[in-house]
Amino acid sequence: MSGPMLRLALRSLAHHKVRTVVLALCIALVGVLPAAVDGLLDLYRARLEARALSTPLVVGAPGSRSDLLIHALYYRGVVERSIEMKVAMEAGESGLGVPIPIHLEGSVNQYPLVGTTPDYQEFRGIRLAQEHHWPQRLAEAALGAGVARSLELTVGDTIATDVHKLHDLAGSYPLLLKVTAVLPATGTPDDDAVFVSLHTSWVVTGEGHGHLKIDPEKDFHLVLESKSNHVTASAAVVEAVEVTAENEDSFHFHGDPDQLPITALIIDAKDDEGATILRSRFRRQKDLQTIDSMVELKELLTVVMRAKAILDANSMLVIVATTLLLILIVTLDVKVREREVKTLERIGAPRGFVARLLFTEVSIVVLSGGFLSYLLAIAAIRFIAEGPLLLP
Amino acid sequence: MTGSSVSVSDLVHCHVGQQHPVRVDKISIEAGEKVAIMGPSGCGKTTLLSCIAGILSPSSGEVQVGETRIDQLSDSRRRKFRREHIGLVFQEFELLEHIDVKENSFLPLWLDGREPTEEEHAKLLERSRRCGIEELLHRKPRALSQGERQRAAVCRALMTSPSLILADEPTGSLDGASGRAVLDLLFEEADLTGATVIVVTHDSTILDGFDRVEELSGSVS
């Protein structure tokens, strides 16, 4: 392609601005979806695999394996059943690895509220700023970077948990959480989660609670039954919604601590041998299921890739249709520009010059459209990638 | 630069779908001559000019420009010959609307796949001054008057300093004064370069300045 031909092609395209822009936009729009989907899938696959690699062994209640994977690693969705805290304790007592229990039932401003132990911080290698500390006490919370940015919160602020049972006659109250840490951004699901201690999470989901002391003499209207060593109060007793120095001791859990629920258990095995032994022990227990995150993730991605193949086929059909339309437009364009073509031929345009000129014009439009498509896809990927990880 | 002689003999050209072919028995034009070709509509003036330019290939007969037998050249070589040796001026100017006058003038060079040299830039400036379009070089054709467009077309035809200038009804779309000015310009340039000028016209009022007139009516069937 010579300089003069390129110049002629560019002049012609500039002269027919509307046609050129519309064609380039059409090509860009046709190309942007498959390009963005490809880019996003690559990005998500990399993120998901990185998370799965760093969390190889997960234990939970029997049920959907993919639900458990998504729940434990990406804090999305719910699991059908929980397991008891004693599973985590036994794993810890074995000395083969560090158990990291996950209790995920509550939420804060629609962000998942993850109850876990301080071991989680070390497991994920989370480094906190000097004045920040991992939530240890009741009603303390560490915010993921995305949550803090979105809700404009920082250390020292408070935020209430969401109330899920508005029509619960026994009363269901939000718990005010005090922010003690904001996690650095990692591009993982941690960015969009709120971390609390297991006890806090249990209080939020009603496994435990705190309330003002009742004096049967003064608060007789709140008393259902009064015995020498036991007072039964009605639901009118307001539960504490904020943990203070005065009421902290009033928080308590009913039942055996070993039986308190956790929704998943991550095992940070000491070594491969420890992981194998623990996996084997868990598999022998019928009320547990163990998943290898990478294996499970690959199966999940296979399903996604099947869906993508359908999308790819659809995109291919759209591209073929657009190409045919482009050929039609170019053919019609030659007719419209018959006089220009005739002039070029009459003043001595070399054989094939007009065809090469048209090819150059079409190539410029296609390349521009393709480049625009690429830029739009990059912008879309960046925009979506900065948001929460999209998972079912 | 000297002009090319033109010789046409026993030319027959059949247009597709046309019943009566164009026939020209003999025309001979000396180098540097200015010749008007006249005749009634449909007698084959434009066909003859197209055959001399190599735009059309005759069904039979001989067309010679200088030492070159145009009718024996391949299509590619005829195109090249046209670019290098022949300047064409048309009734409807045939300027490309999407490029300016300067770029239209350089079009024959661009078709050759090359950029104009410094010398050719200077030559364009000089020629555009003589054509009276020096100030219009950066305007698109649609911003010009009819007369200005034809002068721009003449400027383009002369860009390669052709030895033969062929003009098909160059004054057909112009008023009398503009038409005369364009012809004077062609003659002036031809005098400067020695080029041969063949003008097809049906307008007998513009014949001043031609060396002779060829009538096609009697020789075309």
Image: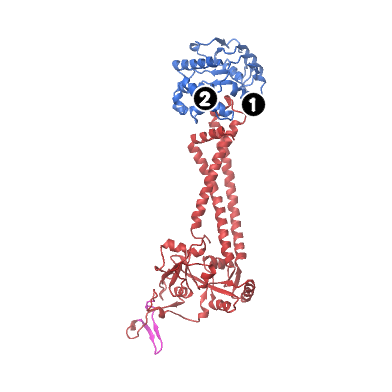
Chain colours: A red, B blue
Q: Which residues are magenta?
A: A222-239
Q: Quadrant of residue A248?
A: bottom left
Q: Quadrant of residue A45?
A: bottom right
On the image, numbered disc 1 is attached to which residue? B76
Residue B48's disc number: none
**Subunit that carries the residue with mark 2:** B
Let me know if residue B38 appears in the view. no
**Is residue A277 depicted above or below A361 in this figure?**
below
Q: Is residue A327 left or right of residue A169?
A: right
* Residue farthest toward the bottom in the current orientation of the protein: A228
Q: Chain of mark 1?
A: B
Instruction: Compare marks 1 and 2 and give the one earlier in the sequence.
Output: 1
Residue found farthest to the left: A218
Residue A337: in magenta span: no
Q: Give the residue at mark 2.
A: B94
Q: Are marks 1 and 2 in contact (CB under 8 Å)?
A: no
Magenta-span inclusion, residue A230: yes
